[in-house]
Each structure stands twice: as C-alpha cells, then as structure tokens.
Image: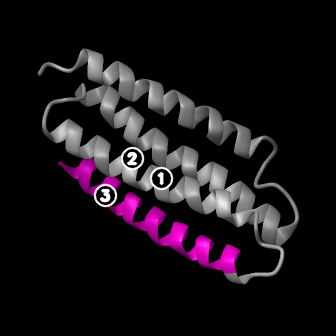
C-alpha cells in the first residue's frame, strides 16, 4: 500500500532527525531544548511503524489507524520543528505550533485507541 510506504519513509526521516537533534542537544552549548524535540521525533517515528504493523495485521481499523499514523507524523513535525526553530532562529515556527502539535499527538493516540476498538479482528 502506497500510504504504508509513505509512512515508513516519514518514520525513517523522523528517526534520523531525532538522532541528529539528540546529538545537537548533547554536544551543543545551551541546546538542551532540543532533547525534548528529539524524543518526540524518535518516539513517534516508532509509533508510526507500530501503527503500520497493527494495520497490516488488522488490529487497527484501516481509516482510523491511517489517520493516527499521519497524525503522529504531522504532530511530531510541528512540535519538534517549533522547538528547533526556537533554538536556532529565536522565534516560533508559527504561533502555537508546539501546542498544536502536542494536541494533535494526543488526538492521534486517542485515534489508536478508537481504531483498536473498531478493528475487525
């Protein structure tokens, strides 16, 4: 499925960016804010891969599971992107980008819950 391939690619990019931000936070002076951005990217990249595995096994409802997986990608990008821009450029990605990303993360996790309840297996 094309959506699965796209999500796997996004998860790979998120994982690579998460490791890069972890290195920057460990080696950069006053870059400790990047540690939480790194954690969000790494954790939600893994969540995307888990959602794909659950979808492939029929343990998540198809549409709801895909919404959750894409929600993880968008929300982590908003959250980590905002923290990174704040660190390096001194301003926000856009007003309320991080809170919007955080809210979308919560909604995506709730979608996983709903998708599990609505699954056919």
48 or 74: nearer the eye?
48
The residue depicted at 88 percent of the width and 65 percent of the height is 90
The stretch of residues the image draws in magenta is 1-26
Camera-near label (3 vs 2) is 2
The residue depicted at 14 percent of the width and 19 percent of the height is 120
Instruction: Sort mark 2 into few (<14), some (14-19) or many (20+) by Cα contacts within 10 Å.
Output: some
**Would you say 33 lies left or right of 73 here?**
right
Question: Does the stretch in magenta take in 7?
Answer: yes
User: Which of the two discs, 3 and 2, labels the residue nearer the N terminus?
Assistant: 3
- Label number found at residue 8: 3
Element on which disc 1 rests = helix
x, y percent for residue 32? 76, 67
Instruction: Sort mark 3 into few (<14), some (14-19) or many (20+) by Cα contacts within 10 Å.
Output: some
- Work out whether 57 lies above or below 19: above
**Would you say 41 lies left or right of 63 here?**
right
Q: How is the image coloured?
A: one colour
Quarter holding residue 38:
bottom right
The chief SS type of the magenta part is helix
- Work out whether 106 lies above or below 56: above
Quarter holding residue 28:
bottom right
x, y percent for residue 5? 25, 56
Q: Mark 1 — residue?
A: 43
Q: Mark 2 — residue?
A: 47
Residue sticking out furthest to the right? 90
User: Which of the two discs, 1 and 3, labels the residue nearer the N terminus?
Assistant: 3
Question: Does the stretch in magenta take in 14?
Answer: yes
CB contact under 8 Å: marks 3 and 2: no
**Would you say 2 lies left or right of 32 here?**
left
Camera-near label (1 vs 3) is 1
Instruction: Sort mark 1 into few (<14), some (14-19) or many (20+) by Cα contacts within 10 Å.
Output: some
């Amino acid at each position: 499925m094309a959506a699965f391939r796209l999500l796997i690619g996004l998860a790979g990019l998120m994982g690579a960016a998460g490791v890069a931000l972890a290195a920057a936070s460990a080696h950069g002076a006053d870059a400790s804010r990047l540690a939480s951005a790194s954690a969000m990217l790494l954790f939600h990249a893994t969540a995307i891969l888990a959602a794909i595995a659950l979808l492939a096994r029929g343990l998540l409802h198809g549409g709801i599971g895909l919404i959750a997986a894409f929600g993880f990608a968008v929300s982590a990008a908003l959250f980590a992107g905002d923290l990174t821009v704040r660190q390096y450029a001194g301003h926000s990605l856009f007003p309320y980008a991080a809170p919007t990303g955080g809210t979308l993360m919560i909604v995506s996790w709730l979608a996983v819950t709903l998708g599990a309840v609505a699954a056919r297996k």
